[in-house]
Image (tube, helix red, strand yellow):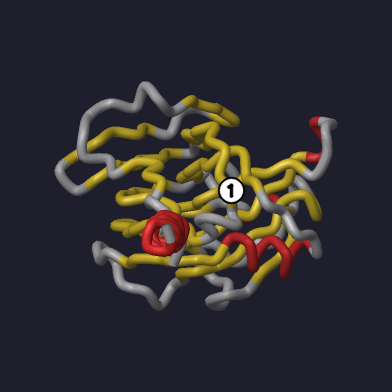
Amino acid sequence: MVLGIVIAFFLSFSSWAFATPIIIDNFTQDDLSHWQKKSFVGETEYKVTDLGLRATSHSSASSLYKEIHIDLEKTPYLNWSWRIDKKLNIANEEIKQGDDFSARVYIIFKTGWGFWQTKSLTYVWASQAEKFQAWKSPYAGKSVMEIALRSKNDKLAYWYTEKRNILVDINKHFGKKIRYIDAVAIMTDTDNTGGSALSYYKKIYFSEH
């Protein structure tokens, strides 16, 4: 009896201690049917290639987003890899005229039932902002916080792998403890500056550690 209890305990502990990573997309198959599109200005072209998901933008702003319910108490870490092959020349990204990025990754969550209570944490590959600098979106205000993870001094055509504790970042930038997120989105946009960008994304997933 005692042995059975001990074995059950360790089995339970093992399943709790090693939460299975939740794959958003590895972009190894040419199938984007499980993503939805949202166009703001024109169409950024998203295509799966041998390198991953290629995003090409010419004076355009459209995104891919995937609705998915993630429990941040189980898998709080968002992991992904990205690279840019063409930089944007932007003087000030904190104003509407400069709110373009070669690569963005959005975490979307709700703080209430109303549509106006939807908020977003946005990790960006900046042109001028310093690494880890954060600011309110010039379009959405405090509902969207933008955080620069990469900037002008990072290499072109070089893969960088990121890991962010979403539970911690939401609490830090919104002052709220949010357990669940509702969607993940990616976007490469150049509509405000009329520029062009080329970037890649791959291996997006949530993990416990």
Q: Is residue 49 above or below residue 74?
A: above
The residue furthest front is 1
The secondary structure type at the circle numbered 1 is strand
- At 49% from the left edge and 33% from the top edge, which residue is drawn? 66
Front-lying residue, 196 or 36: 36
- At 84% from the left edge and 31% from the top edge, which residue is drawn? 114
Q: Is residue 120 left or right of residue 57?
A: right
- At 34% from the left edge and 41% from the top edge, which residue is drawn? 25
- Please identify the quadrant where the C terminus is shown: bottom left
Is residue 20 visible to us here?
yes
Is residue 88 visible to us here?
no
The residue furthest top is 33
Front-lying residue, 185 or 58: 185
- At 36% from the left edge and 32% from the top edge, which residue is drawn? 45
Please provide percent x and percent y for residue 74.
54, 55
The residue furthest left is 50
Badge 1 amino acid: Asp
> Dot 1, crowdedness within 10 Å: few (<14), some or many (≥20)?
some
- Please identify the quadrant where the N terminus is shown: bottom left
Total marks placed: 1
Q: Which residue is mark 1?
A: 71
Please provide percent x and percent y for residue 104.
50, 52
Residue 136: image quadrant is bottom right
Please provide percent x and percent y for residue 67.
54, 32
Front-lying residue, 65 or 78: 78
